[in-house]
Image (cartoon, rainbow, N blue to C red):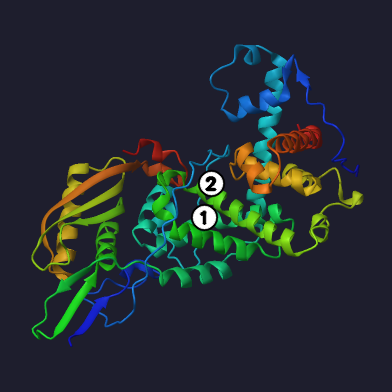
């Protein structure tokens, strides 16, 4: 292996068809926009861009592959991590729950109520809840509360029907576990995924359609 | 004085295997509530130029048809921000392995990487509220693990002999292992291994963690012109190494 001489002067003026390589790298970083006709018009420059793009992708892919090499390696730190953050879940406001004994105060935390709503939504086929919020004085018994949820829904489902089902389930769950005076349940569908597309939602593609 | 009872944690924050409670489940607790520190809003990460990650279809602690395994990063981040620990677990399993490898390459050794990644996720959990666009979760996580790794480097510089860490034996340094049949990704991995640490750090912070030149300069305490030079050298070297694989 040839040792790499870190101190050797790098020819900063290295050119590809008259264009400094630094400039080509920056151009690639910008996603080749705005289009530079001087670069795009040069076969040499395009070749260089192609090679550089390939190297950056391979660089990333080689890390990805290494990451997959020890599939069980991460269980240890993930277990420790979850242990810690479970203690850090912010309970939020206390939602009072009535009790016959006036000396006993019962409450459900906002976070727990959110969890109940999420679970109710997730039980619907083709629905994944994202955010859940309660607007109103949830800590005052009987005060009107508006529940707002956002959801990702599988493409092809009737969104109005889904929203109605979701409202029914959320209302039923909150009715069973809390005494919130829910006046309305607002459902916002902010993401849709394709049935054959399961999993690709992990990327950033679907987020572009958000909001 | 009245007794107080409250459900202290969301019921879906565990493994997800419990059936929904038929009765209101109220748990007596005196646990103090913890307020999460909110850090100042971070800068918008430069999107990393790389393919979207494949979700990791593993079943450790999760049921096979767990719908969250297919959820978008945006959905998971939003749920985690709402206190959904399981959503955060899915995030950690999806992105943690790459973050661990990145940390190892930045640090030049594999010894502390689990700690660094765990720290990075703790920071992420506590700062989820700062993530303006949950869809950029991955780039955001890469930056956090980059920052944590650099913090470690600083500690080393302050307390240790830097040289002791500068030259880890690359996995494939021995010439006789540079055989013709090596796969392209192996070649790339070993090319990255051969880079001097500073060049490799600059390259990976730029290409994988999405740092700007100025941010790398600040993080590594180098002039921006030096960072540009390091990345230019890395580029020349890596392109040369991979020339044979075109």
Count of marks, rendered view: 2
Q: Is residue A85 left or right of residue B176?
A: left
Q: Nearer the viewer, residue A85 or B85?
A: A85
Question: Can you give x and y, in whole percent of width and height, for residue A84 in the image?
Answer: 47, 71
Residue A198 visible? The answer is no
**In percent of the image, x 33 and y 41: which residue is there?**
A192
Mark toward the start of the polypeptide (2 vs 1) = 2
Q: Contact (CB < 8 A) between labels 2 and 1?
A: yes
| Residue corresponding to mark 2 | B53
**In percent of the image, x 60 and y 45: which residue is there?**
B209
Which label was assigned to residue B210? Answer: none
Tell me the quarter of the picture where residue B9 sits: bottom left
Subunit under mark 2: B
Question: Can you give x and y, in whole percent of width and height, for residue A176 in the image?
Answer: 15, 70
For the N terminus of chain A, the image quarter is top right
**In percent of the image, x 80 and y 62: which residue is there?**
B161
Mark 2, Cα crowd under 10 Å, few <14 / some 14-19 / many 20+, is some
Question: Can you give x and y, in whole percent of width and height, for residue B239 in the image?
Answer: 76, 33
For the C terminus of chain A, the image quarter is top left
Above or below — where is B49 with respect to B166?
Answer: above
Q: Nearer the viewer, residue A132 or A89?
A: A89
Tell me the quarter of the picture where residue B205 sits: top right
**In percent of the image, x 30 and y 82: which residue is there?**
B30
| Residue corresponding to mark 1 | B94
Residue A25 visible? The answer is yes
Mark 2 to mark 1: distance in Å?
Answer: 8 Å
Mark 1, Cα crowd under 10 Å, few <14 / some 14-19 / many 20+, is many
Label 1: which secondary element: helix
Q: Is residue B158 left or right of residue B81?
A: right
Label 2: which secondary element: loop
Q: Is residue B95 left or right of residue A137?
A: right
Question: Can you give x and y, in whole percent of width and height, for residue B162 in the image?
Answer: 79, 58
């Amino acid at each position: 292996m040839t040792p790499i001489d870190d101190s050797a002067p790098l020819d900063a003026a290295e050119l590809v068809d008259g264009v400094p390589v630094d400039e080509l790298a920056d151009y690639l970083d910008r996603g080749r926009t705005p289009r530079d006709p001087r670069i795009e018009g040069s076969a040499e420059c395009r070749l260089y861009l192609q090679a550089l793009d390939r190297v950056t992708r391979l660089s990333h892919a080689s890390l990805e592959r290494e990451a997959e090499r020890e599939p069980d390696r991460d269980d240890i730190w993930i277990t420790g991590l979850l242990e810690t953050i479970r203690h850090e879940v912010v309970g939020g406001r206390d939602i009072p729950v009535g009790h016959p004994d006036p000396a006993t105060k019962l409450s459900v935390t906002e976070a727990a109520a959110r969890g109940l709503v999420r679970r109710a939504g997730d039980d619907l086929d083709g629905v994944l809840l994202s955010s859940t919020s309660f607007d109103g004085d949830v800590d005052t018994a009987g005060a009107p509360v508006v529940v707002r949820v956002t959801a990702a829904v599988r493409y092809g489902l009737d969104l109005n029907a889904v929203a109605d089902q979701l409202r029914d389930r959320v209302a039923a769950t909150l009715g069973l576990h809390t005494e919130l005076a829910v006046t309305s349940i607002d459902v916002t569908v902010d993401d849709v995924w394709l049935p054959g597309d399961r999993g690709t939602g992990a990327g950033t593609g679907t987020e572009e359609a958000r909001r | 004085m009245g007794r107080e009872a409250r459900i202290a944690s969301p019921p879906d924050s565990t493994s997800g295997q419990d059936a929904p409670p038929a009765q209101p489940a109220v748990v007596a607790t005196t646990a103090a509530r913890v307020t999460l520190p909110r850090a100042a809003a971070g800068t918008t990460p430069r999107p990393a130029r790389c393919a979207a990650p494949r979700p990791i279809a593993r079943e450790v602690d999760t049921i096979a048809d767990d719908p969250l395994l297919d959820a978008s990063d945006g959905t998971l981040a939003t749920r985690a921000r709402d206190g959904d620990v399981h959503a955060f677990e899915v995030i950690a399993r999806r992105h943690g392995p790459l973050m661990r490898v990145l940390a190892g390459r930045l640090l030049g050794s594999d010894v502390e990487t689990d700690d660094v990644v765990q720290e990075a996720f703790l920071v992420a959990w506590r700062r989820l509220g700062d993530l303006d666009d949950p869809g950029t979760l991955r780039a955001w996580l890469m930056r956090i693990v980059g920052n944590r790794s650099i913090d470690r480097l600083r500690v080393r510089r302050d307390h240790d002999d830097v040289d002791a860490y500068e030259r880890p034996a690359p996995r494939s340094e021995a010439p006789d292992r540079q055989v013709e049949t090596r796969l392209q990704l192996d070649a790339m991995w070993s090319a990255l291994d051969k880079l001097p640490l500073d060049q490799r750090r600059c390259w990976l912070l730029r290409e994988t963690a999405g740092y700007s030149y100025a941010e790398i300069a600040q993080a590594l305490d180098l002039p921006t012109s030096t960072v540009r030079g390091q990345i230019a050298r890395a580029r020349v070297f890596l392109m040369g190494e991979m020339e044979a694989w075109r």
